[in-house]
Amino acid sequence: MSLGGGNSSEGPNAGGIFVQFNQDCTSLVAGSSSGYHLFSLTPDDGIEEIYGSRSGQETCLVDRLFSSSLVAIVTVSAPRKLIVCHYKKGTEICNYSYSNTILAVKLNRSRLIVCLEESLHIHNIRDMKILHTIRDTPPNARGLCALSPCVDHCYVAYPGSSAVGEVQIFDAVHLNAKCVISAHDSPLAALAWSMCGRRLATASERGTVIRVFAVPERTRLYEFRRGMKRCVSIACLAFSACGAYLAATSNTETVHVFRLQENAERAVEDSAAAGNSPTEPGWVDWMSQTLSAGLVYLPAQVTDVLSQGRAFASAKLPRAGYRAVAAVTNVSRQARLLVATSEGILYVYSLDPTEGGECTLLRTHSLLEPRAPANDVASGCSYAGALRGRLPEDMTESEREHELNTAMTGSPPRGSYDIRDPRHFPPMRATTDTSATE
């Protein structure tokens, strides 16, 4: 869910600022010419800036670990250097330099992945030691890779070929190759994991078909057709936290939302259990059932096209020409489609979970306009800030591990608490690290 490294053929900041949602879509990060900024989503479809680095260094990549204080950044002035910070303390915990430009950085609660054009580096996020390096990967100028948010299925997906849409799946905990998926005939353009780490969405450079696979079974679960008139460049694929929806942005003004029927039905059941009235199947479900019944009477080529799912919902961006990332989430228990663009704009759309259709634009937020951060604990610090007056390289291993674990402790989202929502409570942390070493 990022603008840059993962899904663009251009540089991370080409044509505007870098924007990315965190792993559970509860916050948004933005990297600009002045540093990086963290925003939280408010219950009234608004945003609140919770931190602004004000470092004066242009940031081309930034990723926040869920709702924690741990942030990984890469600056334009040092594109081969990864900096890991505790943003609330304003301290730089550690930094690592690589042999080539960093094209993407991915985080979960177990691993940190650094993607270069022809290699992937796997760090243990508890102490930032390099556990394994995947060398001589096929040329990957986009820095295309995806890390599962789930530590129980901690898989890394990356292109296995620069000629066809082959996906390599690597187990980042046990440090071995898991499987290979032949996803498309054309080279890959986008990858995305579901929150459970068992579903992988893929798109190719043609941009007409989006597929969802079960991992590690390699079973094709869904196939969606984005369009038939023209090929486009897919910029972002993003699962909703509940797994019921998959959003796709491209170089056009249209954002598509596809519904994963099995998970959508489960989401309706969960909603009913939470006290909401159940909904009846909409016209999209009726049309899907009608088409499926008639497919047996059509030629195979026509059947292949008609059996591909169509978008359940869509949204029109007011302005085209900017790269965009999307997220499907709930705001005050209402379904929302969020789209952030490299222009520095966040669009908030309503999403009808029953009928789908055209999404209504509710609010527009500018990420670049000046605002006073609500939690500007270290607004005057720089990336070179030190722990108790010492540089990161002078810290002992135990001090570094302590700072990393402190930064990783998540804080619940602002607003009302929901005892049924695990995002409102910090994750349980293991007392020992059983990770393998290289």
Image (cartoon, rainbow, N blue to C red):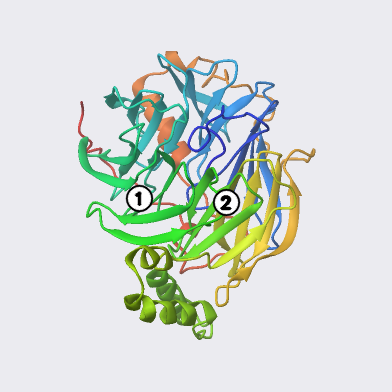
Type of the residue with mark 1: Cys
Assign the C terminus to one quadrant of the image.
top left
Residue labelled with disc 1: 150
Position of residue 389 relative to residue 337, above or below, is above
Residue labelled with disc 2: 326
Position of residue 121 relative to residue 354, above or below, is above
What is the crowding at mark 1: few (fewer than 14 residues within 10 Å), some, or many (at least 20)?
some
Res. 26 visible in picture: no
Classify residue 395 by image quadrant.
top left
Dot 2 falls on a residue whose secondary structure is strand
**Sequence-wise, which precedes: disc 2 or disc 1?**
1
Tell me where residue 302 appears, x and y as whole percent: 40, 66
Tell me where residue 158 appears, x and y as whole percent: 35, 37
The residue lying toward the viewer, choosing from 140 and 327, is 140
**Left or right placement of residue 374 versus residue 396 in this view:** right
The residue lying toward the viewer, choosing from 208 and 424, is 208
